[in-house]
């Protein structure tokens, strides 16, 4: 199998600028056939087979000679082939053991490529400068939220278009949600390109987009788990009034906490506002005021929420 994989790789031009879509598609078919691989749709396995899109990702990632690049979901290495020659180090996290074997063969002569087996939502990430990934769409949210805890320069990621729109949504938009709030507070985001389904194999049933994520220079200092739980309560019914989501929840804890919540909502003049119309900064202000109010009355905000 090793020899056949290497033959398939060698049929691609060594000059990445010369690779065509038919060649990359044939390479994909060959690798899958050689290894007897059937793709697992439950794992979101849709490989990029458009050299133009792969070159676009590489161009906008703009890897420097000293950059460490993290790729989540290496697949059969179509994106990795473009990244590996242009980075000081490429770290690939891959969950599918069958694809780990393929990647190990493809990059066995690359001393700068490290392949880490495991679930990217669970394993420790080594330090990195940039994340570049054709992400399995079902892990878009946990991976994006994990980025709020990391130090990095930029991330260039393909997302399902629907998720990308939620990521970039502003207060009042139809797609505004918890992930919109968290993204806005921690990142500057830009939708760089919408992708046609023909850029992938197998063809997905959803539209896709490439998003660039850049960390804000001064993100808020937050207990991220606590804030995430607060957002889940606040947005439990995002088109209901803020008071109708928060007060019943806290009333189940105690009447005192529900009175404190109601007092803060009136103080901030958002008692009758809908969560979908609160800006990220207003939500952050509400969270901070509630925490201070609870603490001033000797109540643990953390224990009440978690």
Image (tube, rainbow, N blue to C red):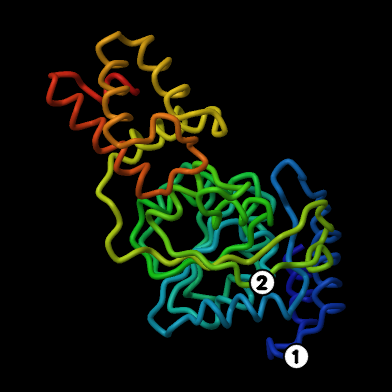
Label 1 or label 2, whichever comes before in sequence order: 1
Camera-near label (1 vs 2) is: 2
On-image quarter of the N terminus = bottom right
Where's residue 157, x and y in %?
Answer: 58, 63
Where's residue 298, x and y in %?
Answer: 13, 19
Tell me: residue 172, above or below residue 287. below
> What is the distance, in whole Å, between disc 1 and disc 2 at their CAs?
22 Å
Q: Nearer the viewer, residue 212 or 3?
A: 212
Say which quarter of the image contains residue 186.
bottom left
Residue, disc 1: 18
Q: Nearer the viewer, residue 13 or 304?
A: 304
Q: Nearer the viewer, residue 4 or 144?
A: 144
Residue in the image at 55% along x and 82% along y: 85
Q: Label 1 neighbourhood size at 10 Å, few (<14), some (14-19), many (20+)? A: few
Position of residue 196 in the picture relative to residue 164 (left or right)? right
Q: Nearer the viewer, residue 150 or 212?
A: 212
Tell me: residue 216, above or below residue 302. below
Residue, disc 2: 193
Where's residue 24, x and y in %?
Answer: 80, 75
Residue in the image at 45% along x and 45% along y: 123
Q: Label 2 neighbourhood size at 10 Å, few (<14), some (14-19), many (20+)? A: some
Residue in the image at 30% along x and 57% along y: 219
Q: Secondary structure at mark 2?
A: strand
């Amino acid at each position: 199998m090793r020899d056949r994989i290497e033959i398939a790789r060698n049929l691609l031009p060594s000059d990445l600028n010369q690779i065509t879509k038919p060649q990359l598609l044939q390479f994909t078919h060959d690798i899958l056939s050689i290894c007897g691989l059937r793709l697992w749709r439950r794992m979101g396995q849709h490989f990029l087979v458009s050299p133009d899109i792969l070159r676009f990702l590489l161009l906008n990632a703009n890897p420097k000679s000293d950059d460490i690049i993290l790729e989540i979901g290496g697949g059969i290495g179509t994106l990795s082939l473009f990244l590996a020659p242009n980075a000081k180090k490429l770290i690939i996290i891959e969950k599918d053991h069958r694809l780990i074997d393929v990647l190990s063969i493809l990059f066995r002569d690359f001393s700068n490529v490290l392949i880490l087996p495991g679930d990217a939502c669970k394993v420790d990430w080594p330090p990195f400068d940039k994340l570049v990934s054709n992400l399995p769409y079902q892990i878009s949210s946990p991976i994006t939220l994990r980025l709020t805890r990391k130090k990095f320069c930029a991330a260039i990621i393909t997302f399902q278009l629907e998720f990308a729109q939620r990521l970039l949504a502003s207060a009042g938009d139809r797609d505004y949600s918890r992930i919109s709030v968290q993204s806005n507070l921690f990142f500057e985001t830009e939708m760089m390109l919408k992708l046609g389904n023909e850029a992938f194999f197998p063809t997905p049933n959803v539209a896709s987009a490439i998003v660039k994520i850049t960390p804000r220079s001064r993100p808020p200092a937050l207990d991220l788990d606590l804030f995430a739980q607060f957002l889940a309560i606040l947005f439990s019914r995002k088109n209901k009034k803020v008071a109708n989501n928060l007060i019943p929840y806290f009333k189940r804890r105690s009447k005192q906490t529900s009175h404190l919540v109601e007092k803060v909502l009136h103080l901030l003049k958002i008692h009758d506002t809908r969560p979908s119309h609160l800006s990220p900064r207003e939500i952050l202000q509400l969270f901070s005021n509630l925490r201070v109010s609870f603490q001033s009355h000797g109540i643990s905000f953390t224990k009440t929420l978690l």
